[in-house]
Structure formats: C-alpha cells, structure tokens
Image (spheres, helix red, strand yellow):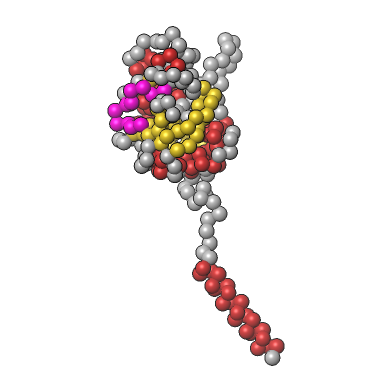
Amino acid sequence: MKIRLMLALALVLSAFAALAAVSQPELPTSTVHAVKPLVVGISDTFPKVPKGEHPKIQVNVSYAEALSRAGHLPVIIPRCGSDEQFDAIVSRLDALVMTGGEDYDPALYGAKRSPKLGVVNAPRDDFDFRLLAAARRRRLPVLGICRGCQLLNIAFGGTLWQDLPSEFPGKDILHRKVHHPLQIVPGSRLARTLGTTNTVVNSYHHQAVQKIAPGFRVTATAHDGVIEAIESEQYPAVGLQFHPEKLVCDENLPLFLRIFENLSNLLGK
C-alpha cells in the first residue's frame, strides 16, 4: 500500500511540474537584460578651468549612470585626438551621446552675438563638431541632450534662439531650473519610446532650437511653444532639450529610463 501511495504521489507531483513548466514559462528578470548592451560614447564636457590649473576630462555622472542602469556600456570620449583618432573611436561605438553645457558661438549658424549670449567655449565647440562629424561619417546613431540637441540642429543646418527671455515671441519664458509640461507629437519615436504624449520634464536652458534643420522635425514642445525635442527623418539622431539622465538618476523617474533602455529604437537605428 505504501509503495502504491508513493508512486501515486510521485505521478501527481510530476504532473504538476510538467503543467507548471507549460503554463509558466521562464521570463527574463528584467527588460534591461533582455536587450543587447550597447557601447555608448559620452562626449567630454570640456570644462573651462581657471588660469594656471590643469584642464580636466569631465562629464556629469548621471549620463553614465542612466546608460548603465539601462544595461549599456558607457565610455567617455575625451577631447584629445585627431580626426583619424575620432574615426577610430566611433568605429567601436554603437551610439553616441552629446552632452549639455555652455552656449554655442552664433557664428556657427551665421548669426551675430546677442548681448544676452552666455558663456561660449570655443575649444569645446570645435571638439563637438569634429566628434559629431566623425559619427556622421560612419552614420553612428546620436542622442543630443540639451546643448547636444542644439548641436544637432546647428550641424545639420538649423539656427538657435540665443536667449529665450529676450528673443522668443511670448511672455514669462522660464526654462532655467524649472519643471514644465511636455507635449509630444503622437507617432513620433519619442512618443513610442515613452508610451505617452504628455509628461513633465526638467529644464536648464536659456537657448533653444529656432529654425529647425532640414531633414529634422519637431517632436515635442513646452507649454509656451519652445521646441523641446527633434528627430531626424534621414539620419539616426534625436535631440532632447531636457535632461532625461537627471530625471532617471536624480529624481528616480522610471518613465525616462525607457529612453536609455530603448536607445536604438528611439534613434531610429
């Protein structure tokens, strides 16, 4: 009798195990680890230093941290190097992030300097354009954040508002150290990535895209009409005027981690 009961119990347990294997397939523990990690370059922010101090290679840690949380492999790209060396570097990357920082020299887009123009870093301007040119030669996908968004627009033939409060046609234009609503164009790659057309983002800028570059389209605006996101229809590139890496790392908002988790799809690779 005991042998029969043991055999019956074994059969029941075996049946439950088989059923569990069929009805509950093993799933990945994280959508991040289900995605192939990308090697992503992050451009040096090239900070100015007081006279007599040694120059530094520097980026805010949140750029690297957001990419790392998304399962990618961040690599800082220093300003040192020839065009040939930049070509060699980008050939080893899957994507490139162009970082935020100072104002661009308006001569780069054929404009005269406004009295309200902020700090300009000419050596960094040169570095940014050379690195982006190397990326374009290999058609490397590019995400431009804040200044990086402006870089994409200038490099592809657009212009900037040099100072929103004094130039943009509107009142009470506040985009420095605030949060504001974001309206995203339905069907855009940004809307598909975030899964929404309305959210709230941070803001740290006083410049923005004015005339959009040929081949790009506006994909998000602030409540006052300021352009907050652009994407190319001809090249794998997206520009975001806000800082998604800060929203991920400083404010722990998982919605914006999707930008880094789905980087290839966002950039249209």
* Residue 36 shows in this picture: yes
**As rendered, which of 189 and 15 lies closer to the eye?**
189
**Residue under the image location 44 percent in, 19 percent down:** 171
Residue 222 position, x and y percent, is 43, 29
**As rendered, which of 206 and 69 lies closer to the eye?**
206
Residue 183 position, x and y percent, is 42, 34
Q: In this view, does 50 lie above or below 70?
A: above
Q: In this view, does 254 lie above or below 112?
A: below
Quadrant that contains the N terminus: bottom right
Residue extending farthest to the top is: 115
Residue extending farthest to the front is: 171
**Residue under the image location 49 percent in, 51 percent down:** 34
Residue 231 position, x and y percent, is 36, 34
Q: Quadrant of residue 18?
A: bottom right
Magenta span of residues: 208-218
* Residue 142 shows in this picture: no
**Residue under the image location 54 percent in, 42 percent down:** 254
On whether residue 108 falls in the magenta region, the answer is no
**As rendered, which of 240 and 227 lies closer to the eye?**
227
Q: In this view, does 206 lie to the left or right of 134?
A: right
Q: In which quarter of the image is residue 61?
A: top right
Q: Is residue 17 left or right of residue 197?
A: right
Residue extending farthest to the bottom is: 1
